């Protein structure tokens, strides 16, 4: 795909983020069609990628917005998402962030601790408002993914633990500026083994029974996001298997009459449409290793350094016989490495290197470490 746009791309400075809006639209259409089969509502997790042209496509496909900061709530609303399709999660919401979201009358605060409930109640009461809330419950389900992106185990900082729920229900009886409307779960990210979601469904069903026994009616069940993508085969598998994903919840989640089911997908919607494009600055031959030194580094894409994550690397400029390279960035950190012993056609200064599947948790995690400039951005198939 990128090779078809090579002439255009060569005009640009690097590092460059390239987004294929045609693939984004096809991905959104598929997710929308598969979720609508069961009447499910999907909120897009802005933290994966919050660029305006991306948000415009997401919104055009009827997704809501899942936000984890006040500025994300603002970004969503400024880009046309209706506040009643905005949810706000996060373990550490500041007073200013809560006040802003209260002023906007968002659909729901996903609350992560009993202390947060007390503060939210106070801030809502001061405005004479009632805040709609969901309890983010830690279901103690293992997502079987990298430990830094596992969020649903009791050892993680996220959510309210099951054993706290009786106290929380008692507390909520006193907090009359809060209206409990749902329960929320999010067990982690880049989950490729669907059995983790099946385990989640089992736990959610148990929690539903518990709330029913305590005469609490829940309008919505939010099962979060986390569906993974295929970083190894971005061309063979550009669109995740949304059909199997939503069908699994339909099969295993017990929904009460009138209840809405919400999802919060981020990565699976936007990862494959993005590529980080870079040029080779230097080739350096070590004793046993050759290094291809790029003009992009961990400042543009931190996932390999942070999670040891794999991204497919391609040389778009060369068709020479293959050799092995450690593909590294220019930053003064040894973890600034995109891949070790990567087979690439013989690579030379000036070659264009594509680092694939960078649309999610790529550009949004950019830093200016080493006083680096921000990467340029281009959108294909506008
Ligand atoms: C990050 C996050 C998501 C999205 O996760 P993906 O793996 O990108 O789908 C959804 N919900 C919450 C609460 C999150 O923090």
Image: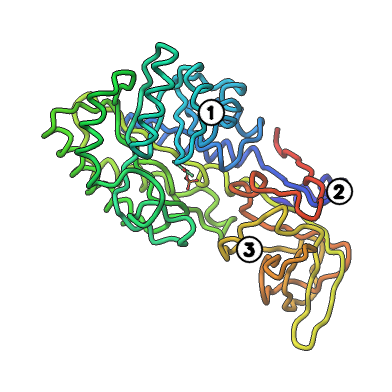
Q: Is 57 displayed left or right of 375 in the figure?
A: left
Q: Residue at x 72, y 45 (%)?
A: 18
> What is the image's colouring?
rainbow
Label 3 or label 1, whichever comes before in sequence order:
1
Q: Secondary structure at mark 3?
A: helix
Measured Cα–Cα span from mark 3 to mark 2: 24 Å
Classify residue 106 by image quadrant.
Answer: top left
Give x and y (percent) for residue 150.
Answer: 42, 56
Give 169 or 290, whichever is nearer the viewer.
Answer: 169
Marks 3 and 1: which is nearer the front? 1
Return the residue at label 1.
97
Measured Cα–Cα span from mark 3 to mark 1: 30 Å
Q: Quadrant of the C terminus?
A: top right
Q: Which mark is residue 13?
A: 2
Q: Is 380 displayed left or right of 55 in the figure?
A: right
Give x and y (percent) for residue 170.
Answer: 20, 31
């Amino acid at each position: 795909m990128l090779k078809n746009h090579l002439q255009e791309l060569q005009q640009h400075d690097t590092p460059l983020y390239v987004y294929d809006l045609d693939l984004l639209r096809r991905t959104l259409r598929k997710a929308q069609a598969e979720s609508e089969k069961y009447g499910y509502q999907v909120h897009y997790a802005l933290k994966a990628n919050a660029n305006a042209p991306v948000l415009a496509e997401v919104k055009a496909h009827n997704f809501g917005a899942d936000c984890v900061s006040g500025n994300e709530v603002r970004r969503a609303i400024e880009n046309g998402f209706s506040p009643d399709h905005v949810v706000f999660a996060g373990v550490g919401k500041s007073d200013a962030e809560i006040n802003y979201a209260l002023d906007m009358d968002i659909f729901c605060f996903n609350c992560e601790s009993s202390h947060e409930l007390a503060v939210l109640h106070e801030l809502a009461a001061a405005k004479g408002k009632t805040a709609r809330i969901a309890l983010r419950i830690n279901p103690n389900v293992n997502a079987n993914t990298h430990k830094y992106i596992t969020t649903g185990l009791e050892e993680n900082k996220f959510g309210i633990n099951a054993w706290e729920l009786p106290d929380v229900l008692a507390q909520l009886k006193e907090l009359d500026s809060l209206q409990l409307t749902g329960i929320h779960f999010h067990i982690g990210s880049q989950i490729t083994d669907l059995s983790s979601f099946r385990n989640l469904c089992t736990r959610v069903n148990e929690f539903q029974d518990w709330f029913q026994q305590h005469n609490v009616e829940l309008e919505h069940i939010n099962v979060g996001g986390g569906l993974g993508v295929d970083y190894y085969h971005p061309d063979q598998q550009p669109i995740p298997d949304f059909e199997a994903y939503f069908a699994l919840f339909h099969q295993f989640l017990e929904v009460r009459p009138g209840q809405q089911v919400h999802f919060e997908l981020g990565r699976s919607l936007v990862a494959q449409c993005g590529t980080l494009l870079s040029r080779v600055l230097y080739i350096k031959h070590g004793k046993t290793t050759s290094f291809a030194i790029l003009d992009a580094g961990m400042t543009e894409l931190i996932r390999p350094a942070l999670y040891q994550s794999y991204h497919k690397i391609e040389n778009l400029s060369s068709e020479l016989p293959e050799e092995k390279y450690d593909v590294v960035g220019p930053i003064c950190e040894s973890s600034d490495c995109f891949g070790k012993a990567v087979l690439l056609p013989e690579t030379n200064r000036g070659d264009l290197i594509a680092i694939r599947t960078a649309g999610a948790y790529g550009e949004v995690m950019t830093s200016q470490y080493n006083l680096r400039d921000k990467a340029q951005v281009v959108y294909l198939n506008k």
